[in-house]
Image (cartoon, grey):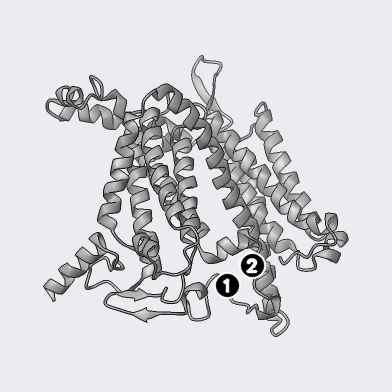
Amino acid sequence: MSARCCAGQLACCCGSAGCSLCCGCCPKVRQSRTTRFMYLLYFILVIGLCCVMMSSSVTKQMKEHIPFFEDFCKGIKAGNTCENLVGYSAVYRVCFGMACFFFVFCLLTLKVNNSKGCRAYIHNGFWFFKFLLLGAMCSGAFFIPDQETFLNAWRYVGVVGSFIFIGIQLLLIVEFAHKWNKNWNAGTDSNKLWYAFLSLATLIMYSIAVGGLVLMAVFYTQNDGCTDNKILLGVHGGLCLLISLAAISPCVQSRRPHSGLLQSGLISCYVTYLTFSALTSKPEKIVQDEHGKNITICAPDFSQGLHKDENMVTWLGTFLLIVCISYSCLTSTTRSSSDALQRRYGAPELEVARCCFCFGPDGEDTEEQQNVKKGPRVIYDEKKGTVYSYSYFHFVFLLASLYVMMTLTSWFHYENATIETFFTGSWSNFWVKMASCWMCVILYLWTLVAPLCCPSRQFSV
C-alpha cells in the first residue's frame, strides 16, 4: 500500500495522472476540482510572496534576525539591503512572471475539449515541473533589462487587465441576479410557495441595502461637514431606487416579464457593499479640535480602536483579500459562468426551481455529474469531455494576477505603498470601487433597457 501511494504521488507531481492529494483519510476528489485547486494553490503562494515583499515590518524583521543579511543581499546582487526584492517594483516583477505562466497555459490549452489529449494531460498533471516553471518565470522577471521602461509599460497592462477582471465579476453578478429570479419563478407554476420565497429574499435584500445606507449615514457623516460622503450616499441611494423602479416599470415588464425586485434588490445590496468598501478605503480626514488635538472626522469613532493592533488588521485584511480573489477566480471559471458570459443559456422549459439553484438536484454541480469514472482517491469526471474551459480558466487567473498586482500596490499611488498602509485607505482604491459600483448599475440597467432598444433581438435572461 505504501509503495502504491508513493507511486501515485510521483505520478501526480511528475506525470500526467490526476492528483489525489495523497491522503488516505481524505474523501475521493474529482479530477477537475483537484486541478483547479492546485492552480489556485500556486496562485495563493505567489500572492503570499507578494504580500511579504510589500511588508515593511517583515523586511525589518529579516534585517534584525537573519545573520549576514547584508552579505547575502550583496551576494545575490539584490542591493545592499535587498531593496530590489521588496516594494512595488518587486511585486510587479513577480506578478509578471505569474501572468506569463498562466498566459503560456492559456495558449497551450486553446480549444482543448477532451481530457485524453496530450495538452489536457499537461494541464492536469506534472505539478512539480509546473511549480519549477512558475518559480523560474517569477525569478527571471528580475533580470529583464531596462527595468524602468518595463515597469512603466507593465503598469498600464496591469490597469487594463484589472478592469477586465472587475468587468467579468460585475457581469457575473448581474447574470447571477437574473438566473436566480428565473429559477425561482419557474417553480411558481407548480407550487405557489415559491412566491413566498421570492418575497422573503427580496425583503431581506432590501432591508440589508436600506439598513446599510442608514448605518453609513450615521457613522460616516456629521451634522457639519462630510459633504462628499452625504452626496455619495444620496447618489447611491438614488441609484438603488432608480434600478428598482426601472425593474417594475410597465415598459420593461412588457419586454422582460421576468424582471422584478429580486434582481434589483441583489444589485442594491452589492451597491451598498461597494459603497461601504469605498468609504472605508478613503484616506482619513484629520482636523484639529478647539483644544488643538488632531481628530478623525467622517469616520466611525471606533475605527481608532480597531487599528490599535496594526499587524492584526493588516494580516486579517490580507487574508480576506486573498480569499475573496480566490473565490472570484473559481466561480468565474465554471462552465456555467463561461456560458453566461457568452449568453448561452438552457431552455426555459427545462428550468427546475431549487433553493440552491447553482447545484444539481443531488448536491453536485450539474456540469460535473456525467461521465464519472471512479479510481483510487480520484474521480475522473472528464472521461468524455472537459467540464470547464481550460483556456478560459487560465485567462481568468492571468487577469487575476494583474488585479492582485494593482491592488497590492495601491493602483496609481504605488511609490510609497506597503501592505501595512494598504488598509488605511487611498484615493486610488476609493475611485476604483466607485467606478465598479457605477459600472454594475449601468450593466444592470442595460439588461433592462436592451430589449427596448433592440426589439428585434431575443434576450434569453
Residue ID at (26%, 77%) = 376
Contact, mark 1 vs mark 2 (Cβ under 8 Å): yes
Pick whichever of labels 1 and 2 is earlier in the sequence.
2
**Quarter where residue 70 is shown:** top left
Q: Secondary structure at mark 1?
A: loop
Front-most of 16 and 56?
Answer: 16
Label 2 crowd (10 A; few <14 / some 14-19 / many >=20): many
Within-10-Å neighbours for mark 1: few <14, some 14–19, many 20+: some
Q: Check disc 1 and report the residue beneath it.
A: 357
Residue at 65%, 69% (x, y): give it: 345
From the top left corner, tell me how far across and down residue 295 is, in percent.
51, 23
Is 24 placed left or right of 50 in the picture? left
Q: Secondary structure at mark 2?
A: helix
Amino acid type assigned to the residue bearing label 2 in the image? Trp
Which residue is labeled 2 in the image? 180
Picture coordinates of residue 85, whole percent (x, y) = 30, 29
Q: Residue furthest front?
A: 118
